[in-house]
Image (cartoon, rainbow, N blue to C red):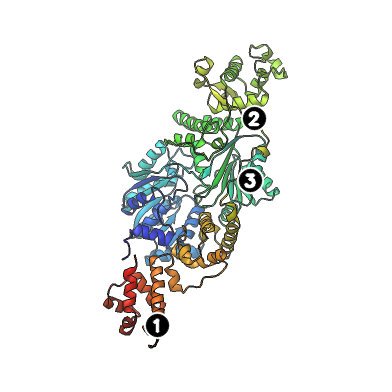
Amino acid sequence: MPRDTAPGEALLKDIFGFDAFRPGQGEIVDAVARGENVLAIMPTGGGKSLCFQLPALMRQGITVVISPLIALMRDQVRGLREAGVAAGALTSGNSQEETDAVWDMLHDGSLKLLYLAPERLASSNTQHMLSQAGVSLIAVDEAHCVSQWGHDFRPDYLRIGALRQALDVPLAAFTATADQETQGEIVNRLFGGELPQTFLRGFDRPNIHLAFQPKDSPRKQILNFAEARRGRSGIVYCGTRARTESLAKALGDEGHNACFYHGGMEAESRRRVEERFATEDGLIVVATVAFGMGVDKPDIRWVAHADLPKSIEAYYQEIGRAGRDGAPAETLTLYGPDDIRLRRSQIDEGLAPADRRDADHGRLNALLGLAEAQGCRRQVLLGYFGEASEGCGNCDLCDTPPELFDGTEAVRKALSAALRTDESYGAGHLIDILLGNETDKVRARGHENLPTFAVGKDLTKGQWQAVFRQMMGHDLMRPDAERHGALVMTDRALPILKGEEQINLRRDVVRKAAERRPAVKMLVNEEDMPMMSALKAKRRALAEAARAPAYVIFPDRTLIEMAEKRPETLDEMARISGVGAKKLERYGAAFLEVITGAREELHPMRRKLAGSESGQLYDALMEAQVRLARGEDGTGKYLSCTNATLAKIAKHRPNSLSSLENVSGMDSQKAERFGQAFLDVLHEAP
């Protein structure tokens, strides 16, 4: 008899093509499906969307999904429809035909998931429509957008709590980026202060390689990084709009397929870039952080930061856009003293209250600590989010442990130079003093007579620059906006200055970019690369024909498994992760032909059973029928059942001759000829 399967697990396989939940998903799905209020904090790429999409199919009524970006909503709706799910979005980017289709599904009761932008909640028409639509669940994606002090704040997210109360339905909120403070804001603003069932599913993304480099010809560093990953989809984040345009041009000049994206572009131009990024393989988008929040493209293979992000949360969210399919992905973050000055001044010159500015400095300190880490970066990153971990083996410092030296004396010399010049100068002037360079500026201020003049000749200018950068990274000195960026000592530096504490620094030696290029992570082994290329070519052709993003056909992770396991039949293809029933029916034979070089011809009824126990039963029933088509002795009148009848028997497994005879397409004559043989096949099945 067939094994009992929970409804969620059956839908997981049939609709989404996955044999099992990712760690932590199952509990969240169960809680949301039961109708509990839920707050789930999961790593980007950890499968958040499945945690509300699957319960939506398990529950009666409509699930409303509040999501911040039109591009994200359109991608998810497209993917759901490919899997056979009735989903739609009402957005300003809809065509009239798309909007009409959503309203038709609303009216006939077939719609299961309705995606809305938060801004749409301001409309009284929307409120009225939702009150009449039979909504049974609200799902909130990117729930941290409710935080008024967050960098992704969306004012209309504040309307969601009132909507939950008005509809009197459960709410499930999802985010990958929420410290304790932001979690509190989510609970208060979305759940009215009532504590939801909370799931904290870890922040580790072990498939992402972490790397930082001090800036040294940053344009060349980015070009070098992209060249080593030519043909792979990537994002380069820049601190200014102008830099996105110039760096995109530089990448284009090197032959890369690259474009830029920032908030100053016309809306139509931005939409065009979003559409290209969704549909084109290997496109590089050079962007400000305006691009990518909630990006649902699973096969972004790398993310680079040409400038230091604003905070450790921003960094974590932005690198999290790589490798959402679980396949290897890489990151590179460049940083330098100018970045640190800029970020400090943005905080100090902002309009936030003093306690908020202190908290923002703390978040920046955490990011700088990650940049200047002296051991495994993943340990430092996860430690900030309250998680302990072992050395990861998948970051630049695990690849090549840094050489450390006792930097106490150098730091004390630098602090002394700053204090003896009344903390009124930047690193350049202080380094001239330490090196004994009698510049016009040094002589004009009489600084050649200071006790610290020329005491730092044991280090080069480049080494002193590295010392000052690391001092700012350890928050021993900060640029003061009121003193035009002059370096000022912090309280954390006092114990070192007084000789009460020591400090180790990294021995950063400036190397040529070509010498420091990190090894490129391969998606598959060398022997599987030709097959992977052929599968990607087939995917690209199908995607272009369907005018859909390549990953909507199959994500990289699924193609990797195909290339490694080389399925030879549709049954084996159905066991590949990500190959659900609809996609197997639609694309299975085409990809199987690439792998085997031959097309497997299966009757459509058999194809629908591929990968299931029913498919194997169908084959056994067909063998029994062929054997008995002319009776036991081979001389009787020819009889056969239709493919549809055999499929019904395989699926429903009648356990007696009378129940077998009641199957559509059977009759007493066929039951007499095949009945006992069919029952023997069914009884012998596991």
Report, in whole angstroms, how far the alpha carbon at label 1 lies from the one at label 2.
81 Å
Position in image of residue 686 (x %, y %): 34, 64
How far apart, in angstroms, are the residues tagged by discs 3 and 2? 23 Å
Residue in the foreground of this view, choosing between 349 and 613: 613
The residue singled out by tag 2 in the image is 509
Looking at the image, is mark 3 or mark 2 earlier in the sequence? 3
Asked if disc 1 and disc 3 are in contact, CB closer than 8 Å, the reply is: no
Q: Which mark is residue 453?
A: none
- As drawn, 552 above or below 207: below
The mark nearer the N terminus, 1 or 2, is 2
Q: Dot 2: few (<14), some (14–19), or many (≥20) neighbours within 10 Å?
A: few
Q: Which residue is mark 1?
A: 629
Per the rendering, the mark at residue 226 is 3
Is 469 on the left-hand or right-hand side of 5?
right
Residue 672 screen position, x and y as percent: 31, 82
Labels 1, 3: front one? 1
Q: Residues within 10 Å of mark 3 (few under 14, many from 20)?
A: many
